Amino acid sequence: MRLNLQTDYALRLLMHLAVNGDRFSTIADIAHRYDISKNHLMKVANILAREGVIEAVRGRSGGLRLARPAETLNVGAVVRLMEADLAIVECFQGGKGECLITPACRLKGVLKEALEAFLDALDQYTINDLVARNGKLRILLGQAAA
Amino acid sequence: MRLNLQTDYALRLLMHLAVNGDRFSTIADIAHRYDISKNHLMKVANILAREGVIEAVRGRSGGLRLARPAETLNVGAVVRLMEADLAIVECFQGGKGECLITPACRLKGVLKEALEAFLDALDQYTINDLVARNGKLRILLGQAAA
């Protein structure tokens, strides 16, 4: 069981931007620091910008920053946003791969309950909770190169 | 976020065997009913037999059946057994892909907590809970072909 790479990158990107406050950060810098694909990160940034989570300003002095306070960015909400379908088994995807026992299957309900427990646990935290009073993280992610 | 296919198949296999009680079922029959790969199902059956969850008897009148009562087969335990590493993000795998912020990362703890909530929810159910008094399922999976 694994989160989409996009979700992982989105959470790391948001932590970086939360640490850097009003300062703009560039995709190139963030990708370099985390040693992850710039192209993948760009796709993730596009989704987050489209959804109003981050602000993307073009041009030399532009870059990315949070569009909303980190205290309002719920970790569970970010995961729901990035995990397109949360289909932990085939039958969660509408229409695809109809299973013989679907009409009588209790497992689907059990898995749904477990998935909700997973998301509920994430809902207890915001991006701010991950970065606030975390001096070590601020050193690792702070003061993005101009 | 998705369970390994092996986990999905293991749960379906165990439901089938639970419905069929002491009767042996063949991999070919189960794979055919669920319309899934016989080879993949065989691998899953090998793991479950090795772990003492199912009994595999060779020969013409042999096949697979549960090695233990379905009431004692916990859904969470089956998922833990089949999901080799439960690495929901890269840094859960020891040694691989060290992330820049690992020394200061609170996200890992948050994800671990959510994963535990997911498994705790599954721990509330046994394979028997999925099949008991489920007449429709018994019709769909019962009376395996000899």
Image (cartoon, coloured by chain):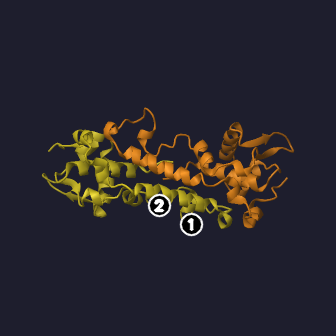
Chain colours: A orange, B yellow
Q: Do the residues labelled 1 and 2 touch (CB within 8 Å)?
A: no
Mark 1 and mark 2, same subunit? yes
Element marked by disc 1: loop
Which circle's residue, 1 or 2, is located before the other in the chain?
2
Q: Quadrant of the C terminus of chain B?
A: top left
C-alpha span from label 1 to label 2? 13 Å
Pinpoint residue A17: horizontal percent, then vertical percent.
75, 52
Residue beneath the point at 56% across and 66% down: B95
Amino acid carrying mark 2 in the image? Asp
User: Is there any visible trace of residue B35 in the rendered image?
Assistant: no
Q: Of B113 and B59, which appears nearest the observer? A: B113
Mark 1 or 2: in front is 2
Q: In which quarter of the image is residue A135?
A: bottom right
In x, y percent, where is residue B45?
29, 55
Taking the view exactly as shown, the residue that stands out farthest to the right is A61
Mark 2 falls within which chain? B
The residue that label 2 is drawn on is B85
* Chain ID of residue with mark 1: B
Badge 1: residue crowd in 10 Å (few <14, some 14–19, many ≥20): few
Choose between A45 and B60: the one closer to the eye: A45
- What residue is pinned by disc 1? B95
Q: Which amino acid does label 1 sit on?
A: Gly
Image point (43%, 32%), residue name: A95
The residue lying at 25 percent from left, 46 percent from top is B133
Mark drawn on residue A119: none
> Residue A73's x, y, as percent?
68, 48
Residue drawn at (45%, 34%) of the image? A94
- Quarter residue A128 falls in: bottom right
**Left or right side of B95 for A71:** right
